Amino acid sequence: MSFVEQPTFGQEIAVPARLPIILKQFCKAAIRTQPYDLLKWSSSYFRALADGEEPPIKSRLEYPPPSTASGLTLGFLRVLLRQFGNYNKTLPIETILRRWDCLCLDHRDFDTILAIGRFHHTCQVKKFLAVAVGLLGANLTETMIMVCQLFSHEPDGGSAMIPLTLFMEIYEYLAGLACDGNEKNTFEQDTTERTMCKESSVDHTTCSVNSQDTDVDINLDSELIFKDEVDLSKTDLSTELIENSSFEGETTTNSEEKGDKSLTNQKDDSSIGKDSTDINDMISKKFCGVKDANSDRSLSSGVEKDAKITCFPNVPGIGPRLSAERVANVTAWMLECARLQEGMVGPRNIRHTNCPSLHERSTSKS
């Protein structure tokens, strides 16, 4: 049987000699990274290789695996740090989100990080990664140990030493955040005070009193203002009564409209009551501190909406805002350690028995 050659149409497909090596490296990277969406991650992987960028791959397989399919781990944060390069640079939120999507991570964690750090348009890489590490730890002490492991240039399994300046900058930043779930109450108190001051200070000349004035002068001024307002209210009420009486005289020409006359009197009385309440509100606004109950309800409802939007979530890895005394004690200890270690600190200094607690220990409720 003779062999018949098949004609070739067009150009032949040129298979590169390095294709087996490329596929082998791709398979190893996929096994190490364990992405949630393999197709999406593969597109990001080959796009990064084509553009000459750092591909989204882990340096080694993490064990144990993350608890959720698209969960956040310290290995993924190392990949982000490697892609960003310098941790001191400031990047747009869109750039960080694109890298986040390339690793197929959960968007809810990304939104939580933005809410905790109050990042709107741009953010610093080390602050973003520090808050992200806080989502992984059980308390601030464990978070700082993982921060050392993340920013250290030493290989895995080493002492994970980082510069003292970087350690204290991240620790002071995380210590200033309130992520214990109780920020909502304090925020409501602060916002109610601000809104009360804004609503009550209608006239800045009467609400703001110079520090050189005495209490007697303040009382005299308030009495004069109150008398003037009361006189104005009386004149306004008298003119309104005269107008209402003339209006009633014109409408009561027929004897069959007696019932309507009583109704108009009731409406006029209610309007007089409303005018008097408006005058009282105007007088009360002159003095900071007197408000209507309805205004209180509207302000409280608005404050509650704002508090629900801006309150911090409960993140045990960051915890409550720490006192300045605790931060000062940790700083003194780390300075002593850095003096003996050429300006470097690490997890072994945190685990030392003489090291003060980096987080506020929770007390059992009785």
Image (cartoon, rainbow, N blue to C red):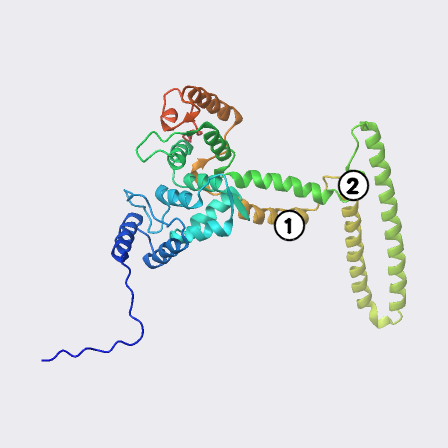
- Tag 2's secondary structure? helix
Q: Visible in this render: residue 89?
A: yes
- Tag 1's secondary structure? helix
Along the viewing direction, whichever of 90 and 219 lies nearer the viewer: 90
Along the viewing direction, whichever of 333 and 356 lies nearer the viewer: 333
State which quarter of the image contains the N terminus: bottom left
Q: Position of residue 121 (x, y in %)?
A: 55, 49
Q: Visible in this render: residue 363?
A: no
Q: Please indicate whether residue 296 sits to the left or right of residue 229 in the image.
A: left
| Residue hosting label 1 | 298
| Residue hosting label 2 | 204
Amino acid type, label 2: His
Q: Position of residue 211 (x, y in %)?
A: 78, 29
Q: Which quadrant of the view contains residue 246?
A: bottom right
Upstream in the sequence, badge 2 or badge 1? 2
Along the viewing direction, whichever of 285 and 267 lies nearer the viewer: 285
Amino acid type, label 1: Ser
The nearer-to-camera label among 2 and 1 is: 2
Q: Please indicate whether residue 100 sits to the left or right of residue 288 in the image.
A: left
Identify the residue at image location x=38%, y=29%: 161
